[in-house]
Amino acid sequence: MTGVETLPLSRAINAGLRASLAGSDRVLLMGEDIGKLGGVFRVTEGLQAEFGDRRVLDTPLAESGLVGTAIGLAMAGFRPVVEIQFDGFVFPAFDQITTQLAKLTNRHEGALQMPVVIRIPYGGHIGAVEHHQESPEAYFAHTPGLRVVSPSTPNDGYWMIQDAIASADPVIFLEPKAKYWMKGEVDTSARALPLHASRVVRRGTDVTLVGHGAMVTTMLQAAALAEAEGTSIEVIDLRSLSPIDYGPILESVRRTGRMVYAQEAQGFASLGSEVAATVMEQAFYALEAPVLRVSGFDVPFPAAKLEGVYLPDADRILEAVDRSLAY
Amino acid sequence: MTDATATGAGASDTDAPVVRFLEADGTFAPTPAAERYREAVDGLSDADLETFYRDMAVIRAFDVQATNLQRQGQLALWPPSYGQEAAQVGSARAARPQDHLFPSYREHVVTRIRGVDPIDIIRVMRGLTHGGWDPTDPANGNTRIYTLVLGAQTLHATGFGMGLVFDGRCGTGDPERDEAVIVYYGDGASSQGDVHEAMVFAASYRTPEVFFLQNNQWAISVPVATQSRTPLFKRGEGYGMPSIRIDGNDVLASWAVTRAALDEARSGEGPRAIEAMTYRLGAHTTSDDPTKYRTSDEEESWRRRDPIARMKAFLLGRGASDAFFADVDAEAEALASDIRERTNALDGLEADSMFAHVYSEEHPLIEQQRQWLAGYDASFEGDQA
């Protein structure tokens, strides 16, 4: 596959995984139902048939076991890529991720690298049952030693998964499951951006709108609606949740003087909180209004019939944009 | 005694078969379960046997010295290995040079035998590092660093064993080259879910691995009867692993059974489990007070089964010389005083070092904070302390 192709996000990540598997025989995929079935979202479809069951492992059903053995495999020189089936199922592995994976390089004073990728389909919009629609990114972004990224487009999915696998550090790779079937152009000839860069996805002059994952699509919808009303919104995709590339964000806020962060996750102690605090610390005199956040409510992700109320949509984002402009 | 003992065999079931060669008084009297290993033990030379004794006696002197150093304020904490020397010496001496050892945090005997400098453990307990040594340095004998989250290392060992399988580094039939893994954990850790998951994965991928459980009877203050109503070695059988109980205070049983289990595992026969019945004669750590939860009668009954006294009696019966024991005592004393001197000579830490190796690759936030702290510290230059 070379040149430009139109693919849905799930197929783009699949193509990226294939490229990494082909590029190094140290790369292994591990997870529940990822082999024969190709994963519940079919992201790994066809890879076990192509690379064999020693490269693409259908493991026992145990998330701590998955991550813990991935750590051991990394100690033995492999580059494991673990799939967690759904966001809410990462927590049985939380101990291995935060007390072990995140700290082992530090505890070994650099003598040991931990090139482990943990892929997690995350977020709502799919009408699913409990534990299947959550946004746990803040737990991982809060943990020293982890890198956290989230692609929002097929092109980013293709490149970022390869860059995550190539990283010497553990990477939490959050896949916005609501966008798995969203198509976009994938340019396989060259990567557009490094793994940890944020990106301006739409230029604007009045308000800076920042977010990540599936929310990028919603922010673009909001920007299009605002344009019809004469408001010019700049949209920035964070892409990397740890570390955060503040360059484009601060540059934008210094032009617009206003910023809104949009996210599916609960707002309390969230990525939006962190970005808002930093922007206020570093661009205080440029601000015409306080930085605002549009988030999920601070309640357990509700039963699916209420997800449309819980999840921020374009209207809720525009409500915050209006409040910002009113200052 | 707990109700578990009253209602059934319980975790300490003394009727379960056990591999033992040396009685508590040093008499060589193999149990029926030991017969299978008899030939291997008979093949041990006097020099081998003396090495076992020397290992145990020397590291006990280190352990006592470290405990004293903690009492004198030189260490934040010390988890004594006192009493568990036979289980550790036997199993560590059974491992071949190419094998990989995953300790928990009380395996001071194991780590030293594999080449780790005991001062590296002191550095951990003195608050100078969270790691201590580089397991990839050949000097350290493929010994991983300690793990304080109980049972977490069993999964790392199993994953490592999966790697050995995938890379064809075991199961070729050549015991001089085939690699195996041994992972240490305790009776308390045996209740952790990670140990269960490690055994599930190990059995599924037939890892070349030995799960070595040191049942020292107490998880801090909680007796093993609270962890299990069945002898812990029987759990291994539930995962399809051949599992065996040994007298963990008999270095010969520990050596022979671990040697066989590792060789079976390395040859491709899959994982094995060993439960070594031993006793933590010291405190859990220097922060612990065992008088609050166990009786002096119980401690005394285990003191009579001391692994070192037992081996000494056995060696004396075989005619070991006074000169040998004097030499061991001198080496033990020398290590203890060397550790004291080197502990006192340890430097502090540069503040800057906490920012190193948080990540392997560049991370702007860490670099920013490192620079900030440097500037902040510099702002005090010239101030009076």
Image (cartoon, rainbow, N blue to C red):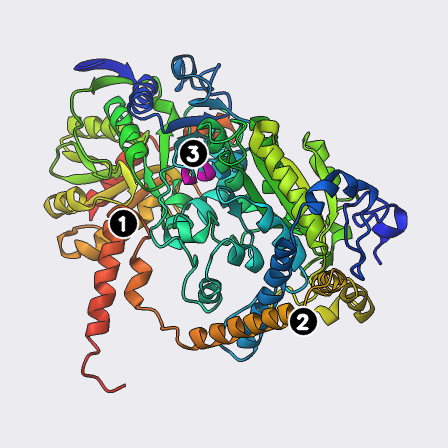
The tag earlier along the polypeptide, 1 or 3, is 1
Q: Which quarter of the figure is the N terminus of chain B placed in?
A: bottom right
Please name the amino acid that badge 3 sits on.
Tyr
Q: Nearer the viewer, mark 1 or mark 3?
A: 1
Q: Residue at 70% across / 65% down in the picture?
A: B281
| In this rendering, position of residue B230 left or right of residue B358 | right
Residue A149, image x, y percentages: 31, 37
Q: Chain of mark 2?
A: B
Please give the residue where the numbered disc 3 appears in the rendered image. A310
Amino acid type at image mark 2: Asp
Q: Residues within 10 Å of mark 1 (few under 14, many from 20)?
A: some
* Mark 1 vs mark 3, CA separation in Å: 21 Å
Q: Position of residue A111 (x, y in %)?
A: 35, 50
Q: Is disc 3 surrounded by few (<14), some (14 to 19) or many (20+) residues within 10 Å?
A: many
Nearest to the observer: residue A258 or residue B69: B69
The residue under label 2 is B322
Residue numbers of the magenta segment:
A71-75
Q: Nearer the viewer, residue B14 or A291?
A: B14
- Label ID, residue A276: 1
Question: Could you tell me if residue A236 is visible in this image?
Answer: yes
Compare residues B54 and B249 and report the one nearer the observer. B54
- Tell me if residue B103 comes above or below residue A132 in the rendering: below
Q: Label 1 is placed on what type of residue?
A: Ala
Q: Position of residue B381 (x, y in %)?
A: 19, 79
Identify the residue shown where x is 30% and y is 25%.
A20
Q: CA distance from mark 3 to mark 2?
A: 81 Å
Q: Chain of mark 1?
A: A
